[in-house]
Image: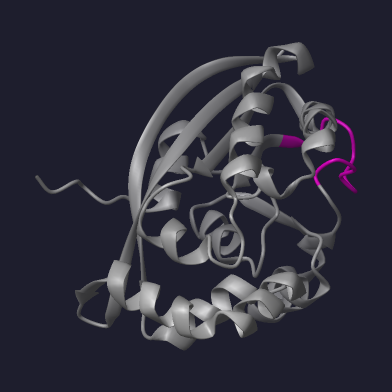
Amino acid sequence: MSVAVRTHLEVIAEHVPLAGASVVDVGCGPGVLARGLLAAGADAWGVECSPTLLDRARAADPGHADQYVEGVGQALPLADAAFDAVVYSYSLHHVPAAAMGAALDEAHRVLRPGGVLYVVEPEAAGPSFEVVRLVDDETEVRAAAQRALAGAEGHGFVRRVSTAYTSELVHADLQSMIDRVISGDATRAEALARHRDEFARRFAAHGRSVPGGLAFTQVNLVAVFERR
């Protein structure tokens, strides 16, 4: 049975009122989602710790370059009660496990009362996971993110929604996936250099042929909280 594929922005828009809202994407990477939020009518900001990815985000959106700032989730360079929504899209598991509680505290600090914390995390399973785990097995860090979210009420949040959806990413070729996997992460680049042949084998084995390349589906877990 086929599973309906959703985009990340579609699902966010179902749970976060975007038009006219101030939204920060923590761990924004090259700014793809932040630009989508802007297009949907939000006053979108991005926070990113990788200077390389931050430069890409600013270059891709020069009209809002000053809204992409360097920082980390556990110490957001943002004012108190400045945002209607905080988004973590595939990024909470990149916060050190010992600092995830601090990241939730920071989200609470920068949100206005009644604001929304939206977190989407990929399951530690699926075609893409089986390829990438060769160079970076995220099983434990993704589990740590779920444990942190289970304790979010202790950081001033009330969980409103728990749901899941399937997304899909198409890579034109092997190099496209390699570039995405190693962007901003030197340790992954080193591991991939050692295991490139096996990485290529897994890429071909787990991808599904579609027009434009190979497609990789991913089940995503969504948690939506309201700031008390």
Is 135 on the left or on the right of 106, as rendered?
A: left
Where is residue 47? Give x, y as percent. 77, 55
Is 187 on the left or on the right of 91, as rendered?
A: right
User: Where, quadrant-wise, is the N terminus in this rendering?
Assistant: top left
219, 155: nearer the viewer: 219
Q: Which residues are magenta?
A: 73-83
Is 24 on the left or on the right of 206, as rendered?
A: right
199, 146: nearer the viewer: 199
Q: Is residue 6 visible?
A: yes
- Magenta segment's dominant SS is loop
Q: Residue at x 65, y 49 (%)?
A: 91
Q: Residue at x 32, y 47 (%)?
A: 166
Where is residue 145? Give x, y as percent. 64, 35
Magenta residue check for 76: yes
93, 20: nearer the viewer: 93
The answer to which image quadrant residue 156 occupies is top right
Where is residue 21? Give x, y as percent. 62, 40
Where is residue 86? Give x, y as percent. 67, 38
Q: Residue at x 20, y 75 (%)?
A: 210
User: Where, quadrant-wise, is the C terminus in this rendering?
Assistant: top right
Magenta residue check for 37: no
Q: Is residue 9 above or below residue 165?
A: below
Q: Is residue 82 visible?
A: no
